[in-house]
Amino acid sequence: AVTGPQDHVTEMRATFRRRRDLACAALDAAGIAHRRPAAAFYVWLPLGLEDSLRWSLELLDEYGVAVAPGRAFGPSGEGHIRISLSTSDDELLEGIRRIADKLDRDRGSTP
């Protein structure tokens, strides 16, 4: 892997950069706080959740969206979720839309 062709690395780097920009723009448009990664395949969302595991399981059960609960990355991750950029553009945008829907519902903005 280290000495072989590296074309796929350049291609995947560009793909993840494009998805990062797409996700961050969608999160900005939805008013969802996030940390724009410099070099990662995920976006970190500091949502101020009391229980990131419970919230993540509710998101999966009620909205069909899988995210990583922040607490999985240590005590300082509690209150956050992590969304992966390892999916198609359409699925990424739909997942962000559903996250926004759940946040709105949790805040009482939607029935």
Image (tube, grey):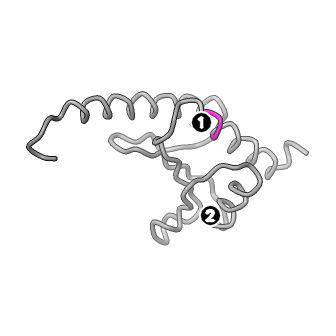
What secondary structure predominates along the stretch shown in magenta?
A: helix
- Residue at 61% across, 53% down: 66
How many dots with numbers? 2
> Dot 2, crowdedness within 10 Å: few (<14), some or many (≥20)?
many
Mark-to-mark CA distance, 2 and 1: 22 Å
The percent position of residue 25, horizontal first and vertical second, equals 54, 28
- Residue at 45% across, 66% down: 73
Observer-nearest of 53 and 104: 53
Q: In which quarter of the image is the C terminus?
A: top right
Report if residue 10 lies within the magenta region: no
> Dot 1, crowdedness within 10 Å: few (<14), some or many (≥20)?
few
For the record, the magenta segment spans 91-95
Judged by depth in the image, the label closer to the viewer, 2 or 1, is 1
Contact (Cβ within 8 Å) of mark 2 with mark 1: no
In the displayed structure image, the side of residue 47 where residue 83 appears, left or right: left
According to the picture, the residue beneath numbered tag 1 turns out to be: 91
| Residue 92 quadrant | top right
According to the picture, the residue beneath numbered tag 2 turns out to be: 52
| Residue 104 quadrant | top right
Q: Residue 106 carries which label?
A: none
User: The residue under label 1 is which amino acid type?
Assistant: Glu
The percent position of residue 65, horizontal first and vertical second, equals 65, 49
Whichever of labels 2 and 1 marks the residue nearer the N terminus, that label is 2
Observer-nearest of 21 and 6: 6
The percent position of residue 76, horizontal first and vertical second, equals 48, 67
- Compared with 96, 70 (above or below) is below
